[in-house]
Image (cartoon, grey):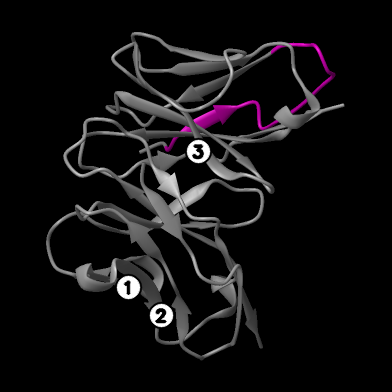
Amino acid sequence: AQSVTQLGSHVSVSEGALVLLRCNYSSSVPPYLFWYVQYPNQGLQLLLKYTSAATLVKGINGFEAEFKKSETSFHLTKPSAHMSDAAEYFCAVSDRGSTLGRLYFGRGTQLTVWP
Amino acid sequence: KAGVTQTPRYLIKTRGQQVTLSCSPISGHRSVSWYQQTPGQGLQFLFEYFSETQRNKGNFPGRFSGRQFSNSRSEMNVSTLELGDSALYLCASRIGEDQPQHFGDGTRLSIL
């Protein structure tokens, strides 16, 4: 089974600072990778996805993530944090080539943005 | 285009009761998956349905069941509710095998 590790359950940054949320996966075959964001009392919103194209993936709201096979990582970054970015972020993987729609999630990282 | 719709948004039940949650996927999406989210266990996969057939199931007891209808709408049922079933239940749909899942806002189930 796949597993996902998100380093740091809480990350705090100042408004305008760099956001870096870490995600590592365990798989011998590069899986499909996703980042989702969850605001209070809401479901998960897709930020970006990596399937097999460019290793640097751009998503919504200025976020991007880089797939690094050698490090089995898919870290999420944003150059300048905004107050509205405060939320919980989840990294998820699914098996490449599988018809099965199962996602394996990390435990999440709560992002706090200070004014 | 409407997103994934889950009803009801909130439910309060007592131990021993049963509950049915509903999910309407995005139009054209035939795959529906269900997840349970709790503070202790995080996000856990329950099952996936495609064309009215369950094709994948997570590690949950048989009290958790689901079905999908011909219009792709899905329901999940939990029988003999336990306190530990209190959670946010999320439904997600997708259009294709290499496409991401899109989530609804969930049903928050509280067991008293």
Q: Amino acid at mark 1?
A: Glu
| Residue under pointer 3 | B104
Quote the CA–CA distance across marks 1 and 3: 23 Å
Residue placed furthest toward the right: B112
| Residue under pointer 2 | A78
Q: Amino acid at mark 2?
A: Lys
Counting from the top left corner in percent of width and height, residue B14 is at: 85, 19
Q: Which residue is pictured at 41% across the width and 51% down the height?
A: A3
Q: Nearer the viewer, mark 2 or mark 3?
A: 2
Left or right: residue A85 versus residue B17 is left
Quote the CA–CA distance across marks 1 and 2: 6 Å
Q: Are the residues under marks 1 and 3 on the same chain?
A: no
Q: Which residue is pictured at 35% across the width and 59% down the height?
A: A25
Q: Amino acid at mark 3?
A: Gly
Query: Is there CB contact under 8 Å for labels 1 and 2?
Result: yes
Question: What is the quadrant of the C terminus of chain A in the image?
Answer: bottom right
Within the image, what quadrant is residue B106 found in?
top right
Q: Is residue B53 above or below residue B25?
A: above
Observer-nearest residue: B31 or A9? A9
Q: Nearer the viewer, mark 1 or mark 3?
A: 1
Question: What is the quadrant of the N terminus of chain A in the image?
Answer: top left
Numbered badge on residue A64: 1
Counting from the top left corner in percent of width and height, residue A44 is at: 49, 49
Q: Which residues are magenta?
A: B3-18
